[in-house]
Structure formats: C-alpha cells, structure tokens
Image (cartoon, rainbow, N blue to C red):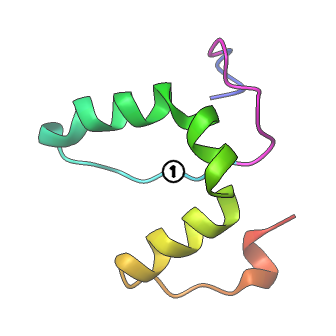
Amino acid sequence: MKRKGVNGFSWQAGYGTFSIGQSHVSAVVRYIQQQEHHHRRLMFQDELRQFFDWYGISYDERYVWD
C-alpha cells in the first residue's frame, strides 16, 4: 500500500493483510475507512492476535512485530 502511494495510508507504521471473499468487500471498505478511529480503542497488535486466534493461524510473536 505504501509503495503504491495510496493516499492516507500512513497514519500507522504496521499493517497486516488478509484475503477476503467478494461478499465481504463492502464491510472491509467500511473497516478501512474507520480504521484510525477503531485503533484508538483496540491496539493493532491486539486485533491482529484476535485474527490469528479466530482463524486458527499459528504464529510466533518474535517474527510478527518489529
């Protein structure tokens, strides 16, 4: 996103990506539009841990964060 020059994608240093089905596009667009406000209540790291847990993705935090 940053390399492609997407406007407004610089308010946070880190990000994660996930693929979605076409039927979820509008919900994801809303999420992205409200993301800055959303992360004032829930830290990015905590939300990413939730995604990993919800989808059964194993991870090692030594390799997830800077």
> Between 46 and 56, which is closer to the camera in this rendering?
46
Q: Which residue is mark 1?
A: 17
> Between 33 and 59, which is closer to the camera in this rendering?
33
State whether the magenta stretch is mostly helix, strand or loop. Answer: loop
> Between 37 and 12, which is closer to the camera in this rendering?
37
Does the stretch in magenta take in 20? no
Q: Where residue 40 appears, x then y in whole percent?
A: 68, 45
- Residue at 36% x, 28% y is 29
- Residue at 38% x, 85% y is 56
Within-10-Å neighbours for mark 1: few <14, some 14–19, many 20+: few
Q: Magenta segment range?
A: 6-14
| Quarter of the image with the C terminus in it | bottom right
- Residue at 12% x, 40% y is 23
* Mark count: 1
Q: Where residue 19 appears, x then y in whole percent?
A: 35, 51
**SS type, badge 1:** loop
Residue 43, quarter of the rendered image: bottom right
| Quarter of the image with the N terminus in it | top right
Q: Is residue 44 above or below residue 9?
A: below
- Looking at this rendering, what residue extends furthest in the front direction? 41
Does the stretch in magenta take in 12? yes
> Between 27 and 63, which is closer to the camera in this rendering?
27
Tag 1: amino acid: Thr
- Looking at this rendering, what residue extends furthest in the right direction? 66
Q: Is residue 41 above or below residue 23?
A: below
